[in-house]
Amino acid sequence: MEKWMEQLQNRVNTLHRLKAYIHVTPEEEKAILTLNTQWGATPYFASLMDPNDSACPIRKQVVPSLKEMNPAHDTPRSLSSKENGGAQEVRPASIVQKVHDRAAFSVIDTCAVYCRHCFRKAQGMTEKPRLRRDVEEGLEWIADHEEIRDVLITGGDPFVLSDEKIEYLVRKLRETPHIRMIRFGTRLPIVLPQRITRGLLKVLGGFHRVPVWVSTQCNHPREITGKTGRAVFDLLRSGVNVSNQAVLLRGINDDVNTFTALHQKLLTVRIRPYTVFHCASAPGIDHFRTPVEKGLRLIRDGLRGHTTGLAQPIYVTGTRKPKGCTAGCTDGRRHRAPKPLKRTPLE
Ligand code: SF4
């Protein structure tokens, strides 16, 4: 069995296994025993946790917390707004989003790590990595929509699929004449870099009319290791571009030093910072949320004019700007945007 598959089989998803990695606090133990929630991490990612610090940024993304019991948002409405809920057109459920010429295509309901800040954790995931039943319908829908030029293959995490299944998806999309690029949304270069095998590189890489891009998710500089660097190097050498889509998370990366260090360190392993997502509302994740203005301030105080222009992600709030608000929020309040950013000649 390949090493990455062993990692998936031996996920750290029981109290007993977790205790081999960290000193579990009474609160963490209570959360694991009382919350009816799916959780777990690869042994590799679990090994990056600080065994003695419950505030460790990796630990907080992996280990359930009692704070998840205090949702402040209406569950059905929060979730339907994220997954195809507002669409006028009837689409296969695997087409989770369509924006102009792009579609997000969910092909699997399994992840290697169940992030505590993910809205999908409330929807339930399966443990077995297999293609969703509605994948064929999704491929047909994409073939019928000639305006779609860019498909984001997402999940769950599509890289937990076998090479054969990934090859099938890439081939079907490359055979669709209007598709110009394929993106994979995957955390595996960060949480399971062992997945970037020769077999996978053969499937994704090489010169082709329709390039493959990888959008990964790294939220803290401590998630980046030598293994990350090697995996990304191998992807790039095969012709696969790698960018990052971070999530702004309270207590994890919402201070200027960490935010700057994250974006600088991403570049040292050749990952291009692409977006920072404002953590949207969903059941059980309110304790990770920051005000929208926080992201604007972090970019102003930590990135723009402070470091290279390559380390400047787009801030995505996922909200429409209401009348009167200058900061891009939709909660009905009026906010003042931070002062304009100064540009330097070196950006
Ligand atoms: S890997 Fe992505 S889809 Fe899976 S739990 Fe984490 S954020 Fe959610």
Image (cartoon, helix red, strand yellow):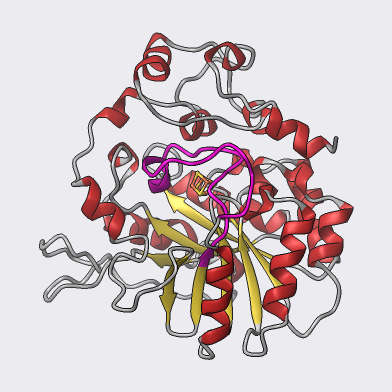
Left or right of residue 298: residue 196 = right
Q: In which quadrant of the rendered view does residue 97 lie?
A: bottom left
Residue shown at the point (30%, 47%) measured from the top left: 282
Q: Is residue 130 magenta?
A: yes
Which span of residues is magenta-colored? 105-132
Residue 93 to residue 177: above or below: above
Where residue 267 appears, x then y in whole percent?
67, 59
Q: Is residue 228 magenta?
A: no
Q: Main secondary structure of the magenta part?
A: loop
Left or right of residue 6: residue 25 = left
Can residue 241 be seen at all in this image of the molecule?
no
Where residue 300 appears, x then y in whole percent?
39, 63
Can residue 72 be seen at all in this image of the molecule?
yes
Residue 88 to residue 287: above or below: below
Where residue 49 appears, x then y in whole percent?
59, 26
Residue shown at the point (49%, 12%) measured from the top left: 24
The C terminus, quarter of image? bottom right
The N terminus, quarter of image? top right
